[in-house]
Amino acid sequence: MKLNIVYEIVPSNFAEDLDKSHFATAGDYVLENATIKAQDVYQRVRKQSTMPLLIIGSDTVVVNSEGTILEKPASPKDAIATLRGLSGKTNTVFTGVCLIVGAKDGSETVLIEKAVESTKVEFEDLDDSLIEAYVATGEPMDKAGSYAYQSLACFFVKSIVGDFYNVVGFPCARFYQMLRSLHEKGLV
């Protein structure tokens, strides 16, 4: 991001193994994943910090037109099947964001703020040779929904309705709104 803020990336140890069937919506699912990730990191770093903490947890999934949550593919074969299913249809990208603001001495959690962003992505019709060539690049293997709009998959997208940045990895406008809210409360 371009905020000129000094930060450190601390990966969560959360296994991301929640049962999707326990959630009413994909938004609820990503929000819970984002919250657990943020809480995991906060619990590990809060006692070591000499400064106030702002922990950001996020999680993204793609939901196909049938309502199935698509995460990262398990194999190239899985990626091919996923992309065939997205071809010529509209999918929705959901990102959950959880912010935890911690006290300077690490003694307490001051605030937890959460939000979900959703963006519609309409795909062109993709033929099998294009899908197989794309999967052979390896690019989709660590991407929710088996595609990276910010790279080669940009050629697959007919239209986007909503936050472009949500599709490429993080909902910047929603995050900014959350930061402004925290700032107005005097917390950041």
Image (spheres, rainbow, N blue to C red):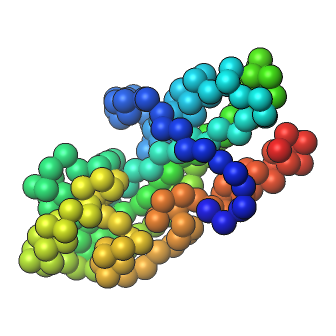
Q: Position of residue 159 (x, y in %)?
A: 43, 79
Q: Position of residue 18 (x, y in %)?
A: 37, 29
Q: Position of residue 31 (x, y in %)?
A: 53, 39
Q: Quadrant of residue 64?
A: bottom left
Q: Give the quarter of the figure containing the N terminus.
A: bottom right
36 versus 161 height, above or below: above
Q: Quadrant of residue 3?
A: bottom right
99 versus 181 height, above or below: above
* Picture residue at 31% right of the left edge, 74% below the top: 153
Of 24 and 131, nearer the camera is: 131
* Picture residue at 76% right of the left edge, 51% below the top: 179
Q: Quadrant of residue 145?
A: bottom left
Residue 176 vs residue 156: left or right? right
Q: Position of residue 89 (x, y in %)?
A: 30, 70
* Picture residue at 71% right of the left edge, 39% below the top: 54
Of 148 and 116, nearer the camera is: 148
Q: Visible in this render: residue 35?
A: no
Q: Give the quarter of the figure containing the C terminus.
A: top right
Residue 183 vs residue 62: left or right? right
Residue 101 vs residue 13: left or right? right
Of 50 and 56, nearer the camera is: 50
Q: Visible in this render: residue 12?
A: yes
The tally of labels here is: 0
* Picture residue at 60% right of the left edge, 44% below the top: 8
